[in-house]
Image (tube, grey):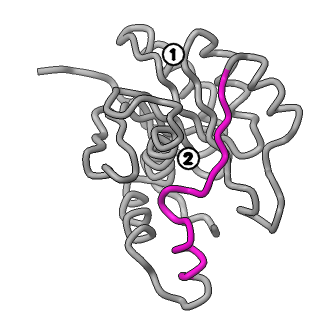
């Protein structure tokens, strides 16, 4: 039997970022976890993580180009540079739990299996869905090992409010992925983001 602590935030959002990063650092040092996957839109959270986790394999996963509007990359150039200077990697690609299915939903007003999975994961909060998604994406890109315990950090909108210990798996082995521990998450889920 194992006992652990989970931090539950009263509200989701950016104001929890520093606490989440400190909790993850402490956990990673105690458990010896070396792979950290972080969601970051503008790169602000990615910069903070890259600074804190200098001796770790840090993968910053961004929104894909065109997520908000055609041809737009939301990652700010100054943040991109600082993330890389601190030794972290950046990965930008189609989201593992939406892809073309999001276009089908928008065009034909129907839902497909990937988005159904995403909506189901959101029952635990937006950050939980994000953590699972970015872990899959980082494995698919070869940036973290398949089948290893990693820590994924995500959030609701901006910043970080969720951290999960995940046994990683690729998209093609999605059902081998395991959420093993919850380090932090909001107690309540916010309204779904318009994405």
**In terms of secondary structure, where does tag 2 sit?**
loop
Q: Is residue 57 magenta?
A: no
Q: Position of residue 138 (x, y in %)?
A: 51, 39
**Res 68 quadrant in image:** bottom right
Q: For mark 2, what is the residue?
A: 12
Residue drawn 37% across the image and 31% down it: 165
- Quadrant for the N terminus in the image: top left
**Up/down of 173 relative to 3, above or below:** below
Magenta region, residue range: 88-105
Crowdedness of circle 1 by 10 Å Cα count: few (<14), some, many (20+)? Answer: some
Relative to the observer, which residue lies in front, 140 or 159? 140
Q: For mark 1, what is the residue?
A: 25
- Calculate the distance from the C-alpha at mark 2 to the C-alpha at mark 1: 20 Å
Residue lying furthest left: 1
Q: Position of residue 35 (x, y in %)?
A: 48, 23
**In terms of secondary structure, where does tag 1 sit?**
helix
Q: Position of residue 40 (x, y in %)?
A: 67, 41
Residue 42 appears left or right of 119:
right
Q: Position of residue 78 (x, y in %)?
A: 88, 32
**Up/down of 133 relative to 190, above or below:** above
**Up/down of 157 relative to 46, above or below:** below
Answer with mark 2 or mark 1, whichever residue precedes in sequence. 2
- Find residue 134 and name its label: none
Relative to the observer, which residue lies in front, 109 or 142? 142
Residue drawn 41% across the image and 28% down it: 150
**Up/down of 149 relative to 129, above or below:** above
Q: Is residue 89 magenta?
A: yes
Residue lying furthest right: 78
Which of label 2 and label 1 is nearer to you? 1
Crowdedness of circle 2 by 10 Å Cα count: few (<14), some, many (20+)? Answer: many
């Amino acid at each position: 039997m194992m006992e652990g602590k989970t931090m539950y935030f009263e509200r989701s959002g950016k104001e929890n970022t520093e606490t989440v990063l400190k909790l993850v650092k402490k956990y990673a040092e105690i458990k010896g976890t070396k792979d950290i996957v972080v969601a970051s839109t503008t790169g602000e959270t990615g910069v903070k993580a890259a600074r804190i986790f200098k001796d770790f394999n840090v993968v910053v996963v961004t929104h894909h180009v065109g997520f908000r509007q055609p041809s737009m990359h939301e990652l700010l150039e100054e943040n991109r540079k600082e993330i890389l200077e601190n030794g972290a990697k950046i990965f930008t690609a189609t989201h593992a739990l939406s892809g073309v299915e999001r276009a089908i939903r928008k065009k034909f007003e129907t839902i497909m299996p990937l988005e159904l999975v995403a909506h189901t994961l959101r029952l635990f909060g937006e950050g939980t869905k994000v953590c699972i998604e970015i872990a899959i994406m980082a494995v698919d890109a070869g940036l973290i090992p398949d089948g290893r315990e990693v820590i994924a950090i995500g959030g609701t909108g901006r910043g970080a409010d969720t951290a999960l210990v995940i046994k990683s798996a690729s998209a093609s082995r999605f059902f081998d992925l395991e959420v093993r521990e919850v380090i932090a998450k909001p107690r309540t889920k916010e309204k779904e983001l318009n994405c």
